[in-house]
Image (spheres, helix red, strand yellow):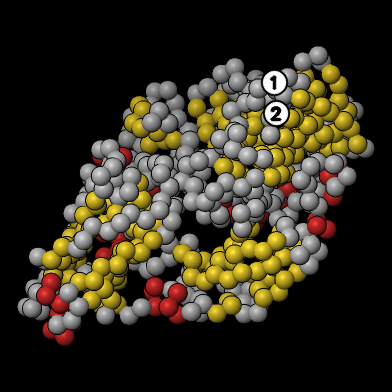
């Protein structure tokens, strides 16, 4: 059976998948491949190593630079657009490329400077397993891109665009004629929210199943481009270090496997997902830096007390060499994180995306480190502080504020965005939904919040807190209350790249505190006090690229 190149392409939306969503589609994976008369093995066509998986997939890897030069599934070529191949980084130079077969596995090794990259094929599977070992900063980013021929998977998702769209920012953010915006950056998802990304059309699914990201940077809440589609073709990404919105240094060492998977149109098998995938077949391949299951350990916690059950909690462990995470059970906070390299890690409990507890934990090969119930101190959660009023709850995200959900898949100028201006009245019932998730120096600086105080409240000094999740160009809030004005706060450490306009609010959570003296308040309890929030910075450009910041919560403490 071939891939029917004459069949009309059906428009289908892409999928960012989870294990739960794909459970019913498990048989679309390696256990249910199409029959093929071809034998498993490889050959040399002079320029490429040609691998036949013995199922429905034949692929080629350049002997010169390690590029994936051909990706044929059911007789249809999927690889390539614009004369470019699929490859690690932006393509490597002249490399040392070798191939060998070990039983039912074929391994291609690529060496370029201090980078090592590997492709593996398994007999009877329509999958390509990939590892990347980056030893230093000689290559800036760490990504693999699968370039896909045009016309095979057309759609109109947030991360797609056409040449009829107008460019509105940095040659990678576009506006359609109807005012909606598109960009390869608009993935909607954090790393922890997806297991695979790709397309399905015409009875064929092409997917990138991510690795466990143990050597990536940014943690479970990191957002980056995952996929794009344009008039000249599409791209699927495994992003390990991209340099945008990074909150920590990059990690080095062997990362993988991540998997290029073809199916009969369904989701990839859940057996390929991070946390589920087992690769005992790779234990004997001799890949430098590879650590099998027996060389890894586990961290488990019996529970977490002091949680606010209205929020999801995540537990992460990280050091300079590796990172891992897992969800805490809603009922009691139990968690288990497996497949961990031996070492000592900082363990962090997150309420939403806000760190509320940290400790140290050590992991040994083959062992399970069991932690007694973790108690979150009341003072570690800013929501526990008594407040006269509070806008939004503290959870490390701008969720709930005006336009917050849209901003993970659209530009702030998008026609679907509500007005970024507008003032807020405490007690109106719409304080959070009326407050914009982002503030910019050149767009909506000077936002006003109206509130009343009792006589007793007005007779005392109070602390005002503004929590932020990231900032662009050192944008930070300076406040004024009636006739009193705060000092300009120092900027916290934040990523130095675009964020608010390319689908990410993720930076370093920071709380600004302002000691407002009693003399600042109005003594007439029937009048509204006026809080003015300005964005200040000596950096930035104009409009949505002026200095800005993303808001988590604002409150006036008792």
Q: Report the front residue among 503 and 32.
A: 503
How many residues crowd mark 2 within 10 Å: few (<14), some (14–19), many (20+)? some
Q: Is residue 521 left or right of residue 166?
A: left
Q: Hey, which quadrant is residue 239 in on the image?
A: top right
The answer to whether the residue labelled 2 contacts the one labelled 1, judged by CB atoms less than 8 Å apart, is yes
**Furthest residue in direction bottom, as rendered:** 456
Q: Residue furthest left?
A: 524
Residue under label 1: 94
Q: Is residue 352 above or below residue 304?
A: above
Indicate the position of residue 474 as horizontal and vertical percent values: 32, 48
Along the line of sight, which residue is nearer the eye, 248 or 471?
A: 248
Q: Is residue 63 visible?
A: yes
On the image, the x and y values in percent for residue 523 come to 8, 78
State the residue position of label 2. Answer: 112
Q: Give 174 or 369, whichever is nearer the viewer.
A: 369
Residue 462 position, x and y percent, is 23, 76
State left or right for residue 129 relative to residue 249.
Answer: right
The number of numbered badges drawn on the structure is: 2
Q: Residue furthest top?
A: 46
Residue 316 is situated, as x and y percent measured from the top left of the image, at 59, 62
- First in residue order: circle 2 vs circle 1: 1
- Name the residue rendered at 26%, 65% in the picture: 431
Residue occupying image coordinates x 37% and y 56%: 492
Q: Which mark is residue 342?
A: none
Residue at disc 2, secondary structure: strand
Residue drawn at the location 81% of the way across and 23% of the way down: 50
User: In this orientation, does residue 75 appear?
Assistant: no
Q: Residue at x 47, y 42 (%)?
A: 244
Left or right of residue 258: residue 280: right
Q: Quadrant of the C terminus?
A: bottom left
The quadrant in which the N terminus is found is top right
Eyeballing the image, is 162 above or below 439? Answer: above
């Amino acid at each position: 059976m071939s891939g029917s190149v004459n069949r009309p392409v059906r428009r289908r939306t892409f999928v960012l998948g989870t294990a739960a969503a794909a459970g019913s589609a498990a048989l679309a994976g390696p256990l249910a491949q199409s029959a093929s008369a071809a034998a498993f093995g490889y050959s040399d066509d002079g320029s490429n190593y040609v691998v036949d998986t013995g199922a429905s997939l034949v692929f080629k890897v350049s002997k010169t630079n390690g590029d994936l030069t051909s990706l044929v599934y059911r007789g249809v070529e999927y690889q390539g657009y614009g004369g470019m191949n699929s490859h690690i980084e932006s393509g490597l130079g002249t490399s040392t490329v070798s191939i060998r077969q070990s039983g039912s596995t074929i391994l291609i090794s690529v060496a370029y400077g201090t980078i090592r990259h590997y492709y593996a094929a398994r007999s009877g599977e329509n999958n390509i397993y990939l590892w990347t070992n980056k030893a230093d900063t000689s290559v800036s980013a760490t990504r693999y891109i699968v370039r896909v021929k045009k016309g095979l998977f057309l759609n109109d998702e947030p991360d797609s665009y056409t040449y009829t769209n107008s460019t509105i920012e940095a040659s990678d953010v576009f506006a359609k004629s109807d005012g909606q915006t598109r960009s390869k950056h608009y993935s909607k998802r954090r790393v922890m929210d997806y297991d695979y990304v790709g397309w399905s059309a015409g009875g064929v699914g092409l997917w990138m199943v991510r690795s466990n990201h143990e050597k990536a940077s940014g943690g479970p809440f990191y957002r980056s481009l995952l996929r794009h589609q344009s008039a000249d073709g599409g791209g699927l990404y495994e992003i390990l270090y991209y340099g945008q919105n990074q909150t920590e240094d990059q990690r080095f060492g062997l990362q993988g496997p991540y998997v290029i998977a073809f199916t009969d149109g369904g989701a990839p098998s859940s057996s390929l997902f991070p946390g589920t995938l087992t690769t005992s077949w790779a234990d004997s391949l001799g890949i430098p830096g590879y650590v099998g299951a027996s060389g890894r350990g586990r961290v488990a916690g019996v529970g977490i007390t002091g949680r606010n059950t209205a929020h999801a909690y995540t537990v992460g462990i990280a050091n300079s060499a590796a990172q891992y995470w897992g969800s805490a059970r809603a009922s009691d906070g139990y968690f288990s994180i497996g497949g961990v390299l031996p070492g000592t890690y900082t363990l962090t409990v997150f309420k939403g995306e806000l760190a509320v507890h940290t400790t140290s934990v050590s992991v040994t090969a083959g062992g399970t480190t069991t932690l007694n119930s973790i108690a979150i101190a009341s003072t570690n959660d800013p929501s526990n502080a008594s407040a006269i009023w509070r806008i939004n709850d503290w959870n490390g995200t701008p969720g709930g504020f005006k336009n917050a959900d849209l901003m993970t898949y659209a530009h702030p100028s998008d026609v679907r965005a509500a007005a970024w201006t507008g003032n807020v009245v405490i007690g109106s019932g719409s304080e959070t939904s009326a407050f914009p998730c982002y503030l910019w120096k050149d767009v909506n600086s000077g936002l006003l919040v109206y509130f009343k105080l009792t006589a007793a409240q007005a007779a005392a000094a109070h602390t005002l807190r503004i929590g932020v999740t990231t900032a662009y160009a050192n944008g930070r809030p300076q406040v004024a209350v009636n006739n009193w004005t705060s000092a300009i706060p120092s900027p916290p450490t934040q990523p130095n790249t675009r964020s608010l306009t390319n689908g990410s609010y993720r930076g370093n959570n920071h709380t600004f505190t302002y000691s407002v003296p009693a003399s600042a308040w109005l003594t007439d309890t029937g009048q509204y006090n006026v809080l003015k929030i300005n964005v200040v910075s000596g950096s930035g450009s104009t409009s949505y690229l002026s200095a800005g910041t993303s808001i988590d919560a604002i409150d006036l403490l008792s």
